[in-house]
Image: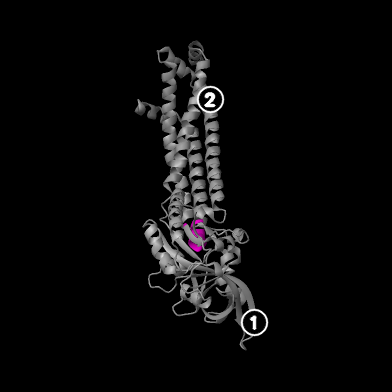
Amino acid sequence: MIFFLFRGIFRDKSRFLFPFSVVSIGVALVVALVGFMEGVFMGMIDMTANLNAGHLRLVNKPFYDEEHLYPLDRALAAQKETKRWLKKNSTPDIEWTPRIRWRALIDVPDANGDTRSQTPVVGMALDLKSPNSSEIRRLQLAESLVKGQLPQDSNEMLMGNSLAKDLDVALGQSVTVIGQSFDGGLVADNYLVVGLIRFGVTAMDKKMVLIDLADAQSTFYMDDMVTDWLGYLPSSLSFDHYVKAKKNINSNLNTWRENPPKDWAKDDQPIALSILDQQNMGSMVKTFTVIKSSVVGIFTFLMILVLWNAGVLSGIHRYGEMGLRLAFGESHWKLILTLGIEGLLIGILGSIVGCVLGGTFAWYLQEVGLNMGDTFAKSGLMINDVVRAQLTLGGFIQGIVPGIFASVAGTLVASSTIFKRSEANLFRELEAG
Protein backbone atom coordinates (compact mmCIF):
# COMPACT_ATOMS: atom_id res chain seq x y z
CA MET A 1 0.00 0.00 0.00
CA ILE A 2 2.85 2.35 0.85
CA PHE A 3 4.40 1.75 -2.58
CA PHE A 4 1.02 2.53 -4.14
CA LEU A 5 0.82 5.80 -2.15
CA PHE A 6 4.38 6.67 -3.19
CA ARG A 7 3.49 6.30 -6.86
CA GLY A 8 0.33 8.36 -6.39
CA ILE A 9 2.20 11.17 -4.67
CA PHE A 10 4.86 11.45 -7.37
CA ARG A 11 2.35 11.24 -10.23
CA ASP A 12 0.16 14.02 -8.82
CA LYS A 13 2.51 16.99 -8.60
CA SER A 14 -0.30 19.26 -7.36
CA ARG A 15 -0.37 17.46 -4.03
CA PHE A 16 3.37 16.82 -3.75
CA LEU A 17 5.50 19.76 -4.87
CA PHE A 18 4.06 22.51 -2.68
CA PRO A 19 3.97 20.65 0.69
CA PHE A 20 7.33 19.05 -0.11
CA SER A 21 8.85 22.49 -0.77
CA VAL A 22 7.35 23.94 2.43
CA VAL A 23 8.73 21.11 4.57
CA SER A 24 12.13 21.22 2.87
CA ILE A 25 12.52 24.98 3.31
CA GLY A 26 11.18 24.90 6.88
CA VAL A 27 13.48 22.09 7.99
CA ALA A 28 16.46 23.70 6.26
CA LEU A 29 15.83 26.99 8.07
CA VAL A 30 15.42 25.26 11.45
CA VAL A 31 18.60 23.17 11.03
CA ALA A 32 20.62 26.19 9.89
CA LEU A 33 19.31 28.53 12.59
CA VAL A 34 19.66 26.02 15.42
CA GLY A 35 23.18 25.15 14.23
CA PHE A 36 24.17 28.83 14.09
CA MET A 37 22.63 29.64 17.47
CA GLU A 38 24.24 26.64 19.17
CA GLY A 39 27.57 27.45 17.56
CA VAL A 40 27.55 31.06 18.78
CA PHE A 41 26.35 30.17 22.27
CA MET A 42 28.56 27.13 22.82
CA GLY A 43 31.47 29.12 21.39
CA MET A 44 30.86 31.73 24.08
CA ILE A 45 30.61 29.01 26.76
CA ASP A 46 33.87 27.37 25.61
CA MET A 47 35.67 30.71 25.34
CA THR A 48 34.53 31.75 28.82
CA ALA A 49 35.50 28.38 30.29
CA ASN A 50 38.92 28.24 28.65
CA LEU A 51 39.96 31.82 29.31
CA ASN A 52 38.28 32.68 32.56
CA ALA A 53 35.84 30.47 34.44
CA GLY A 54 36.50 26.80 33.72
CA HIS A 55 33.68 24.28 33.71
CA LEU A 56 34.30 24.01 37.45
CA ARG A 57 36.14 26.43 39.68
CA LEU A 58 37.57 26.11 43.19
CA VAL A 59 38.11 29.54 44.71
CA ASN A 60 38.39 31.12 48.13
CA LYS A 61 35.01 32.68 48.96
CA PRO A 62 36.53 35.95 50.31
CA PHE A 63 38.39 36.33 46.99
CA TYR A 64 35.27 35.52 44.96
CA ASP A 65 33.19 38.07 46.90
CA GLU A 66 35.66 40.83 45.97
CA GLU A 67 36.78 39.43 42.64
CA HIS A 68 36.42 42.75 40.84
CA LEU A 69 39.21 44.13 43.09
CA TYR A 70 41.60 41.21 42.40
CA PRO A 71 42.48 40.87 46.12
CA LEU A 72 45.63 38.72 46.02
CA ASP A 73 45.71 38.67 49.83
CA ARG A 74 42.62 36.44 49.66
CA ALA A 75 44.31 33.83 47.46
CA LEU A 76 44.23 30.21 48.56
CA ALA A 77 47.45 28.78 49.99
CA ALA A 78 48.72 25.18 50.01
CA GLN A 79 48.76 24.77 46.22
CA LYS A 80 50.40 21.35 46.22
CA GLU A 81 48.13 19.94 48.94
CA THR A 82 45.06 21.37 47.20
CA LYS A 83 46.05 19.68 43.95
CA ARG A 84 46.33 16.32 45.69
CA TRP A 85 42.95 16.82 47.40
CA LEU A 86 41.20 17.74 44.13
CA LYS A 87 42.53 14.67 42.34
CA LYS A 88 41.40 12.47 45.20
CA ASN A 89 37.94 13.97 45.68
CA SER A 90 36.78 14.54 42.10
CA THR A 91 36.10 12.24 39.18
CA PRO A 92 39.02 11.27 36.88
CA ASP A 93 37.47 13.03 33.88
CA ILE A 94 38.06 16.46 35.48
CA GLU A 95 41.38 18.10 34.60
CA TRP A 96 42.42 20.68 37.22
CA THR A 97 44.78 23.56 36.52
CA PRO A 98 45.97 26.41 38.82
CA ARG A 99 45.82 30.07 37.84
CA ILE A 100 46.40 33.52 39.31
CA ARG A 101 44.22 36.47 38.32
CA TRP A 102 45.91 39.81 38.80
CA ARG A 103 45.61 43.45 37.84
CA ALA A 104 48.47 45.94 37.55
CA LEU A 105 49.90 48.87 35.63
CA ILE A 106 52.11 48.26 32.62
CA ASP A 107 54.80 50.92 32.31
CA VAL A 108 56.60 51.25 28.96
CA PRO A 109 59.92 53.14 29.18
CA ASP A 110 61.53 55.25 26.49
CA ALA A 111 65.18 55.16 25.45
CA ASN A 112 66.19 57.11 28.58
CA GLY A 113 64.26 54.81 30.94
CA ASP A 114 61.50 57.35 31.58
CA THR A 115 57.83 56.49 31.27
CA ARG A 116 56.65 56.74 27.68
CA SER A 117 53.21 55.15 28.11
CA GLN A 118 51.29 53.46 30.87
CA THR A 119 47.98 51.63 31.17
CA PRO A 120 46.14 49.30 33.57
CA VAL A 121 45.91 45.71 32.39
CA VAL A 122 44.21 42.50 33.45
CA GLY A 123 46.60 39.60 33.76
CA MET A 124 46.36 35.83 33.99
CA ALA A 125 49.16 33.61 35.25
CA LEU A 126 49.13 30.00 34.11
CA ASP A 127 51.47 27.18 33.19
CA LEU A 128 53.21 28.40 30.04
CA LYS A 129 56.63 26.76 30.27
CA SER A 130 55.93 23.08 30.92
CA PRO A 131 56.74 20.93 27.86
CA ASN A 132 53.28 19.33 27.72
CA SER A 133 51.23 22.15 29.22
CA SER A 134 47.50 21.60 28.70
CA GLU A 135 46.95 25.35 29.01
CA ILE A 136 48.83 26.07 25.77
CA ARG A 137 46.67 23.53 23.95
CA ARG A 138 43.43 24.66 25.62
CA LEU A 139 43.93 28.34 24.81
CA GLN A 140 45.47 27.55 21.41
CA LEU A 141 48.30 29.93 22.21
CA ALA A 142 50.71 28.57 19.60
CA GLU A 143 48.09 29.10 16.86
CA SER A 144 47.13 32.54 18.22
CA LEU A 145 50.64 34.00 18.14
CA VAL A 146 50.89 36.95 15.76
CA LYS A 147 54.60 37.51 16.35
CA GLY A 148 57.29 36.06 18.55
CA GLN A 149 57.23 32.90 20.63
CA LEU A 150 55.85 31.43 23.84
CA PRO A 151 57.68 32.20 27.12
CA GLN A 152 60.66 29.96 27.78
CA ASP A 153 62.70 31.83 30.41
CA SER A 154 61.82 33.68 33.58
CA ASN A 155 59.91 36.98 33.45
CA GLU A 156 58.69 36.69 29.89
CA MET A 157 55.26 37.91 28.84
CA LEU A 158 52.64 37.44 26.14
CA MET A 159 50.77 40.63 25.31
CA GLY A 160 47.53 41.20 23.41
CA ASN A 161 48.27 42.41 19.89
CA SER A 162 45.90 45.39 20.11
CA LEU A 163 47.31 46.36 23.51
CA ALA A 164 50.85 46.28 22.12
CA LYS A 165 49.80 48.58 19.27
CA ASP A 166 48.14 51.03 21.67
CA LEU A 167 51.26 51.14 23.85
CA ASP A 168 53.63 51.05 20.86
CA VAL A 169 55.44 48.06 22.35
CA ALA A 170 57.82 46.20 20.09
CA LEU A 171 58.67 42.51 20.30
CA GLY A 172 61.57 41.96 22.69
CA GLN A 173 60.96 45.19 24.59
CA SER A 174 61.09 45.29 28.38
CA VAL A 175 58.08 46.61 30.32
CA THR A 176 57.50 47.09 34.05
CA VAL A 177 54.61 45.51 35.93
CA ILE A 178 53.58 47.71 38.88
CA GLY A 179 51.05 46.18 41.24
CA GLN A 180 50.22 45.03 44.75
CA SER A 181 51.81 42.03 46.40
CA PHE A 182 50.12 39.34 48.46
CA ASP A 183 50.93 41.17 51.71
CA GLY A 184 49.69 44.53 50.41
CA GLY A 185 53.03 46.06 49.47
CA LEU A 186 53.96 47.71 46.17
CA VAL A 187 55.80 45.53 43.67
CA ALA A 188 57.56 46.41 40.45
CA ASP A 189 59.09 43.78 38.20
CA ASN A 190 60.45 43.88 34.66
CA TYR A 191 59.11 41.53 31.98
CA LEU A 192 60.26 40.94 28.44
CA VAL A 193 57.53 40.89 25.79
CA VAL A 194 58.40 37.79 23.77
CA GLY A 195 55.09 37.23 21.97
CA LEU A 196 52.14 39.18 20.62
CA ILE A 197 48.92 37.23 20.67
CA ARG A 198 45.43 37.59 19.26
CA PHE A 199 42.90 36.04 21.64
CA GLY A 200 40.06 36.52 19.16
CA VAL A 201 38.06 38.50 21.71
CA THR A 202 38.34 42.25 21.19
CA ALA A 203 38.01 43.13 24.89
CA MET A 204 40.88 40.78 25.77
CA ASP A 205 43.12 41.77 22.87
CA LYS A 206 43.07 45.34 24.19
CA LYS A 207 43.59 44.73 27.91
CA MET A 208 45.10 41.32 28.69
CA VAL A 209 48.59 39.90 29.21
CA LEU A 210 49.70 36.38 30.12
CA ILE A 211 52.67 35.36 32.26
CA ASP A 212 53.85 32.05 33.65
CA LEU A 213 52.45 30.92 37.01
CA ALA A 214 55.87 30.60 38.67
CA ASP A 215 56.82 34.13 37.55
CA ALA A 216 53.61 35.57 39.00
CA GLN A 217 54.19 33.77 42.31
CA SER A 218 57.65 35.29 42.42
CA THR A 219 56.56 38.81 41.45
CA PHE A 220 53.59 39.02 43.83
CA TYR A 221 55.20 37.02 46.69
CA MET A 222 52.67 34.19 46.42
CA ASP A 223 54.78 31.10 46.96
CA ASP A 224 52.58 27.95 46.88
CA MET A 225 49.45 30.13 46.43
CA VAL A 226 46.96 30.58 43.60
CA THR A 227 43.69 32.47 43.26
CA ASP A 228 41.85 29.79 41.27
CA TRP A 229 41.71 26.10 40.46
CA LEU A 230 39.86 25.60 37.18
CA GLY A 231 38.42 22.20 36.29
CA TYR A 232 37.73 21.10 32.72
CA LEU A 233 35.36 18.33 31.67
CA PRO A 234 34.94 16.63 28.27
CA SER A 235 32.90 18.80 25.88
CA SER A 236 30.41 15.98 25.29
CA LEU A 237 29.02 16.25 28.84
CA SER A 238 25.87 18.26 29.55
CA PHE A 239 25.42 21.17 31.95
CA ASP A 240 23.69 18.81 34.40
CA HIS A 241 26.98 16.96 34.83
CA TYR A 242 28.68 20.24 35.86
CA VAL A 243 26.08 20.76 38.57
CA LYS A 244 26.46 17.21 39.92
CA ALA A 245 30.27 17.50 39.97
CA LYS A 246 30.04 20.83 41.81
CA LYS A 247 27.70 19.40 44.47
CA ASN A 248 30.00 16.41 44.98
CA ILE A 249 33.06 18.64 45.50
CA ASN A 250 31.22 21.00 47.86
CA SER A 251 30.03 18.10 49.98
CA ASN A 252 33.63 16.88 50.33
CA LEU A 253 34.84 20.42 51.06
CA ASN A 254 32.72 20.51 54.21
CA THR A 255 34.79 17.65 55.59
CA TRP A 256 38.08 19.20 54.47
CA ARG A 257 37.31 22.51 56.19
CA GLU A 258 37.13 20.69 59.52
CA ASN A 259 40.82 19.77 59.18
CA PRO A 260 42.27 22.42 56.81
CA PRO A 261 45.89 22.79 55.68
CA LYS A 262 48.07 24.66 58.16
CA ASP A 263 48.86 27.43 55.64
CA TRP A 264 45.22 28.49 55.27
CA ALA A 265 44.03 31.65 56.97
CA LYS A 266 41.41 31.24 59.67
CA ASP A 267 38.66 32.73 57.50
CA ASP A 268 39.59 30.89 54.30
CA GLN A 269 36.55 29.17 52.88
CA PRO A 270 37.09 27.45 49.51
CA ILE A 271 33.95 26.88 47.45
CA ALA A 272 33.27 25.05 44.22
CA LEU A 273 31.38 26.78 41.40
CA SER A 274 30.25 25.67 37.98
CA ILE A 275 30.37 27.90 34.93
CA LEU A 276 26.61 28.37 35.31
CA ASP A 277 27.20 30.17 38.64
CA GLN A 278 29.54 32.74 37.10
CA GLN A 279 29.09 35.81 34.92
CA ASN A 280 25.33 35.29 34.71
CA MET A 281 25.84 32.18 32.58
CA GLY A 282 23.01 30.25 34.24
CA SER A 283 20.34 32.75 33.21
CA MET A 284 21.90 33.04 29.75
CA VAL A 285 21.61 29.27 29.28
CA LYS A 286 17.94 29.38 30.28
CA THR A 287 17.28 32.33 27.96
CA PHE A 288 19.06 30.59 25.08
CA THR A 289 17.01 27.42 25.64
CA VAL A 290 13.78 29.44 25.57
CA ILE A 291 14.81 31.30 22.40
CA LYS A 292 15.84 28.09 20.63
CA SER A 293 12.59 26.38 21.60
CA SER A 294 10.64 29.43 20.42
CA VAL A 295 12.39 29.41 17.04
CA VAL A 296 11.59 25.72 16.53
CA GLY A 297 8.01 26.22 17.77
CA ILE A 298 7.35 29.21 15.51
CA PHE A 299 8.61 27.45 12.40
CA THR A 300 6.62 24.33 13.29
CA PHE A 301 3.44 26.38 13.71
CA LEU A 302 4.00 28.22 10.44
CA MET A 303 4.62 24.96 8.58
CA ILE A 304 1.45 23.42 10.04
CA LEU A 305 -0.52 26.53 9.08
CA VAL A 306 0.77 26.57 5.50
CA LEU A 307 0.39 22.82 5.06
CA TRP A 308 -3.11 22.95 6.51
CA ASN A 309 -4.16 25.48 3.89
CA ALA A 310 -2.33 23.53 1.20
CA GLY A 311 -4.14 20.38 2.34
CA VAL A 312 -7.51 22.12 2.22
CA LEU A 313 -6.86 23.34 -1.34
CA SER A 314 -5.61 19.91 -2.37
CA GLY A 315 -8.60 18.27 -0.68
CA ILE A 316 -11.04 20.35 -2.69
CA HIS A 317 -9.60 18.88 -5.89
CA ARG A 318 -9.75 15.39 -4.39
CA TYR A 319 -13.34 15.42 -3.10
CA GLY A 320 -14.41 13.28 -6.05
CA GLU A 321 -11.71 10.71 -5.29
CA MET A 322 -12.77 10.66 -1.62
CA GLY A 323 -16.43 10.21 -2.55
CA LEU A 324 -15.56 7.29 -4.82
CA ARG A 325 -13.50 5.59 -2.11
CA LEU A 326 -16.27 6.07 0.42
CA ALA A 327 -18.82 4.72 -2.07
CA PHE A 328 -16.70 1.56 -2.40
CA GLY A 329 -17.05 1.06 1.35
CA GLU A 330 -13.85 2.57 2.68
CA SER A 331 -14.40 4.12 6.12
CA HIS A 332 -13.75 7.77 6.92
CA TRP A 333 -11.02 6.85 9.41
CA LYS A 334 -9.20 4.60 6.96
CA LEU A 335 -9.38 7.34 4.36
CA ILE A 336 -7.88 9.85 6.80
CA LEU A 337 -5.22 7.27 7.76
CA THR A 338 -4.05 6.92 4.16
CA LEU A 339 -3.96 10.71 3.80
CA GLY A 340 -1.91 10.87 7.01
CA ILE A 341 0.53 8.31 5.60
CA GLU A 342 0.85 10.48 2.49
CA GLY A 343 1.67 13.42 4.76
CA LEU A 344 4.20 11.28 6.61
CA LEU A 345 5.95 10.27 3.39
CA ILE A 346 6.07 13.87 2.17
CA GLY A 347 7.37 14.96 5.60
CA ILE A 348 10.13 12.35 5.54
CA LEU A 349 11.25 13.24 2.01
CA GLY A 350 11.06 16.98 2.71
CA SER A 351 12.95 16.59 5.99
CA ILE A 352 15.75 14.66 4.28
CA VAL A 353 16.18 17.33 1.62
CA GLY A 354 15.87 20.10 4.26
CA CYS A 355 18.57 18.47 6.40
CA VAL A 356 20.90 18.33 3.41
CA LEU A 357 20.31 22.00 2.56
CA GLY A 358 20.36 23.33 6.12
CA GLY A 359 23.20 21.03 7.13
CA THR A 360 25.33 22.20 4.19
CA PHE A 361 24.84 25.84 5.16
CA ALA A 362 25.58 25.12 8.86
CA TRP A 363 28.66 23.09 7.88
CA TYR A 364 29.94 26.03 5.82
CA LEU A 365 29.52 28.39 8.77
CA GLN A 366 31.18 25.82 11.02
CA GLU A 367 34.27 25.49 8.82
CA VAL A 368 34.59 29.05 7.48
CA GLY A 369 32.84 31.12 10.14
CA LEU A 370 31.45 34.63 10.05
CA ASN A 371 33.54 37.61 11.15
CA MET A 372 31.46 39.69 13.58
CA GLY A 373 34.33 41.40 15.39
CA ASP A 374 32.96 44.89 14.74
CA THR A 375 29.57 43.87 16.14
CA PHE A 376 31.00 42.39 19.36
CA ALA A 377 33.79 44.96 19.81
CA LYS A 378 31.93 46.97 22.46
CA SER A 379 29.60 44.28 23.75
CA GLY A 380 31.88 43.08 26.57
CA LEU A 381 30.86 39.50 25.81
CA MET A 382 33.55 36.84 25.72
CA ILE A 383 32.78 35.75 22.15
CA ASN A 384 35.28 34.98 19.45
CA ASP A 385 35.32 37.60 16.70
CA VAL A 386 34.76 34.82 14.14
CA VAL A 387 31.53 33.05 15.09
CA ARG A 388 30.88 29.54 13.83
CA ALA A 389 27.89 27.27 13.61
CA GLN A 390 27.89 23.88 15.31
CA LEU A 391 26.58 20.90 13.38
CA THR A 392 25.10 18.42 15.86
CA LEU A 393 22.77 15.44 15.82
CA GLY A 394 20.43 17.37 18.11
CA GLY A 395 20.14 20.15 15.54
CA PHE A 396 19.04 17.68 12.85
CA ILE A 397 16.51 16.09 15.21
CA GLN A 398 15.07 19.51 16.05
CA GLY A 399 14.54 20.07 12.33
CA ILE A 400 13.31 16.59 11.34
CA VAL A 401 10.73 16.09 14.10
CA PRO A 402 8.87 19.38 13.49
CA GLY A 403 9.06 18.83 9.73
CA ILE A 404 7.43 15.41 9.86
CA PHE A 405 4.97 16.46 12.57
CA ALA A 406 3.93 19.57 10.65
CA SER A 407 3.36 17.60 7.46
CA VAL A 408 1.24 14.93 9.18
CA ALA A 409 -0.64 17.41 11.37
CA GLY A 410 -1.39 19.75 8.47
CA THR A 411 -2.68 16.87 6.35
CA LEU A 412 -4.84 15.41 9.13
CA VAL A 413 -6.36 18.77 10.04
CA ALA A 414 -7.16 19.50 6.40
CA SER A 415 -8.55 16.02 5.70
CA SER A 416 -10.84 16.14 8.72
CA THR A 417 -13.22 18.30 6.66
CA ILE A 418 -14.57 15.18 4.91
CA PHE A 419 -16.55 14.44 8.07
CA LYS A 420 -18.55 17.58 7.34
CA ARG A 421 -19.53 16.46 3.85
CA SER A 422 -21.86 13.64 2.96
CA GLU A 423 -20.88 10.78 0.67
CA ALA A 424 -23.55 11.88 -1.81
CA ASN A 425 -22.05 15.37 -2.09
CA LEU A 426 -18.53 14.00 -2.47
CA PHE A 427 -19.69 11.54 -5.15
CA ARG A 428 -21.64 14.28 -6.95
CA GLU A 429 -18.40 16.30 -7.21
CA LEU A 430 -16.83 13.29 -8.93
CA GLU A 431 -19.68 13.31 -11.47
CA ALA A 432 -19.28 17.08 -11.90
CA GLY A 433 -15.54 16.58 -12.54
Given the image, on which type of amino acid does mark 2 rest? Answer: Val
* Above or below 265: residue 111: below
Position in image of residue 417 (x %, y %)? 52, 20
| Residue designated by label 2 | 312
| Extent of the magenta region | 45-55
- Residue at the (48%, 43%) spot, across then down: 28
Res 47 visible: no
Name the front one of labels 2 and 1: 1
Disc 2, SS: helix
Q: Which one is earlier in the sequence, the residue at label 2 or at label 1?
A: 1
- Tell me which corner region of the image, top left, top right, bottom left or bottom right, holds residue 380: bottom right
Badge 2 density bin: few <14, some 14–19, many ≥20, Cα 10 Å: some
> Mark 1 sits on what residue?
116
Magenta stretch contains residue 72: no
Q: Residue at x 41, y 67 (%)?
A: 81
Residue 218 position (above or below residue 408): below
